[in-house]
Image (cartoon, rainbow, N blue to C red):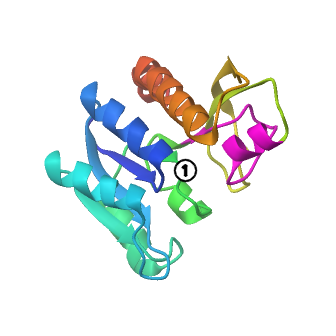
């Protein structure tokens, strides 16, 4: 199984990607969103990771674009792993991979759906948070929950520290369970 697409656009996703590669999870392609012709620091890191590891990488302007859908179909992925991508995956793309699309979300779904769960958990003075890995569907941060793991938010946690801890937790859970996800389809 080496036909995995990784989709991300943040430091959270970079950490997960690095850990997957370090643990010999073979990523064939990386995609990241292109917004207003600006590439952020995390996207530059994704590009660098791709170059170092000889992985194909594409910036995607629009997930609904026919060229994007054709590109992803031609990659013929078994699985798409999404971690903090920053755009909604349309049903046409969710149906492309043989196994499906999984999302690593930095909260305990269904609580704190949306694009900033780490910041929200700190602003809400939550006592704990965690990660949820789901099989994606056409709703936002909704779908069958595969794995959940909880961590305590300590008083001294900043957004950056919590982001780092959740990214490492996410990649560890994904690494431990990727074979199970693949074999159980």
Badge 1 density bin: few <14, some 14–19, many ≥20, Cα 10 Å: many
Viewed as shown, does residue 118 lie left or right of 161?
right
Q: Which residue is pictured at 51% across the width and 33% down the height?
A: 164
Q: Position of residue 76 (x, y in %)?
A: 32, 54
Q: Does residue 109 appear to the left or right of 87 in the view shown?
A: right
Query: Which residue, given by chain and number where applicable, does mark 1 sit on?
Result: 84
Residue appearing at x 70%, y 46% in the figure? 119
In the rendered image, residue 183, in percent from the top left (x then y), is placed at 42, 24
Helix, strand or loop at disc 1?
Answer: loop
Q: Residue furthest bottom?
A: 36
Q: Which residues are magenta?
A: 103-123
**Where residue 9 sits in the image (x, y, percent)?**
46, 57
> Looking at the image, is 177 positioned above or below residue 59?
above
**Residue 177 drawn in magenta:** no
Q: Quadrant of the N terminus?
A: top left
Q: Is residue 180 left or right of residue 135?
A: left
Asked if 68 appears above or below 126 in the picture, the reply is: below
Q: Residue at x 65, y 30 (%)?
A: 157
């Amino acid at each position: 199984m080496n036909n995995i697409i990784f989709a991300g656009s943040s430091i959270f996703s970079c950490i997960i990607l690095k850990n997957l590669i370090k643990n010999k999870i073979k990523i064939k392609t990386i995609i990241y969103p292109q917004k207003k012709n600006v590439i952020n620091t995390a996207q530059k890191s994704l590009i660098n990771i791709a170059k170092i590891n000889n992985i194909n990488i594409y910036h995607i302007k629009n997930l609904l674009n026919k060229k994007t859908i054709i590109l992803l179909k031609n990659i013929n992925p078994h699985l798409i792993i999404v971690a903090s991508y920053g755009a909604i995956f349309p049903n046409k793309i969710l149906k492309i991979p043989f196994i499906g699309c999984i999302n690593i979300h930095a909260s305990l779904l269904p609580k704190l759906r949306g694009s900033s769960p780490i910041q929200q958990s700190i602003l809400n003075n939550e006592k704990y948070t965690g990660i949820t890995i789901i099989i994606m569907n056409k709703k936002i941060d909704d779908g069958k929950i595969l794995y959940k793991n909880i961590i305590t938010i300590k008083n001294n946690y900043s957004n950056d520290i919590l982001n780092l801890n959740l990214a490492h937790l996410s990649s560890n859970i994904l690494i431990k369970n990727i074979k199970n996800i693949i074999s159980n389809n």
